[in-house]
Amino acid sequence: MDVEPAGGRGKAPDRSVNGRGGPSPAPEDGAAHGQDRQGHAPPGQGPPERETGGTDSSANGAARAAAGGGAAAAGTGTAGAPATGSAPAGASDAVSPSPNRDPNEDRNRPADRQGHGSPDRGRAWAELLRVPAVFSVPGDALAGAAAAGHRANRGTALAVCASLCLYEAGMALNDWADRTLDAGERPHRPIPSGRIAPGAALGAAAGLTAAGLGLAAVAGRPALATATALAGTVWAYDLRLKNTPAGPAAMAAARGLDLLLGTAATATAATRTEAAAPRPFRGRLPHAAVRTRRPAPGTGAGRVARRALPSAALLAAHTYGVTLVSRRETTGGSTTLPLAALAAVGGIARSAGRDPAPDRASSPDVPRRRGPRGARRTPPPPRRPAPPPARRRTAARPAPGGDRPAAGAVFAALYGATAARPLLHAALNPSPHFYQRAVGGGIRAMIPLQASLAARAGRTGTATALLALVPLARRLSRKVSPT
């Protein structure tokens, strides 16, 4: 667009710049009479306007750029006459920005509009917390409750929630502690890539730890003590023990404590329910006896935890092998490590399929006789022989829990198949890709292992419900990596 000159109306048009033959724009009066011979503005004024008017359309940019070289030698930019050697629009904007420019232009750029609500930020947190691995957590508390001989109750639910918080706290703390190492080995992780700030990850770890301990405190003192030991193990592993020879043992201890957390919380809730429930009695009891009634010996959380130790040991052994393989998931290794883990999986599957020996000393169904210290325990009175059963031609009913060995063996075989296949692939091709698949398979194999531990304790329904988490974990692992 051509601009009519504000001063010098009787001057002849200059055709050296305007490629269309029309009158060339002249500077305004203030720009023509307020500049010196070098084109500088006097003090108190802003930057000089472009000598071509500052508002030419982009259609004349090519003509001005072509004529700028020859016209700059002839035109000297004297006052009262328009100069012919004007610079291109881009260069003029770089030196003296236009006063009509929007001051919020830089703020409204797409790169600056990516805030906390962008979809990519949600995916970054899912990668940081390794959401597919969360499905392997609830089975710890459920297997612990089954190993203690109790059904799932309010304490079990609190233990599951506390375990989830402590597990995710360890995930966030793990990436925060490895942010420098991941910058070189795995720069696509959320913290090295800049999608999540290191302070935000550390704050999430601290908040989730506090939430887990608070939920455990509601479940009772034994659960809080176990959760405190679990949280200390998680923080010690991520900050100190991860790259030491004690790292796999610390991770295995954390998994075992997670199962014992479910045992302690479930046993405490069952004891409270039993103590609060009224008991039928014959005759009249004194008021003091009603107030000081205690549960039967052998039903406390500490004694019941002994029954869960074999299950906790099996789960810890599996975690130990997975942690050893995970140390080579970025570099790969030899075939020895996957083969050793494969042999460990076979031994764990064999032990998980067996019926555990009943612990008569700590069984809640068989109370022990106690006496004062130093006193001789009196033997129980002899029982009368039971009358012989009537001869009937009916099939004998199986004892409750009689199919536990068969159910436990089925779930144990499923665990072995889930964990052995990726380990076998890693042994045949020990590359980082197959090592990562072996680690992911080992994490998912914890679910059928927990199911087998629950099934051998007589909780076949709990074991079947746990297996429903396997396809969910597998489907979500295709979108977000669990390692």
Image (cartoon, helix red, strand yellow):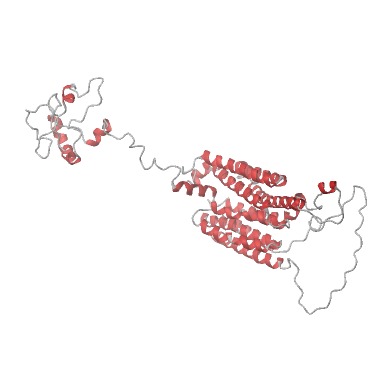
Q: Residue at x 87, y 69 (%)?
A: 386
Q: Nearer the viewer, residue 72 or 313?
A: 313
Q: Position of residue 181 (x, y in %)?
A: 52, 43
Q: Nearer the viewer, residue 440 or 452?
A: 452
Q: Position of residue 315 (x, y in %)?
A: 66, 55
Which quadrant: the N terminus? Answer: top left
With 368 as the anchor, is 225 left or right in this view? left
Q: Residue at x 8, y 28 (%)?
A: 9
Query: Among all residues in the image, which is located at the extreme front?
Result: 284
Q: Quadrant of residue 146?
A: bottom right
The relative height of residue 376 versus residue 241 in the rendered view (above or below) is below
Q: Residue at x 68, y 66 (%)?
A: 407
With 346 as the anchor, is 97 left or right in this view? left
Q: Quadrant of residue 228?
A: top right
Q: Nearer the viewer, residue 3 or 406?
A: 3
State whether residue 347 appears in this view: no
Number of labelled discs? 0
Q: Nearer the viewer, residue 392 or 60?
A: 392
The relative height of residue 331 versus residue 462 in the rendered view (above or below) is above
Q: Position of residue 44 (x, y in %)?
A: 26, 20
Q: Position of residue 36 (x, y in %)?
A: 18, 21
Q: Quadrant of residue 385?
A: bottom right
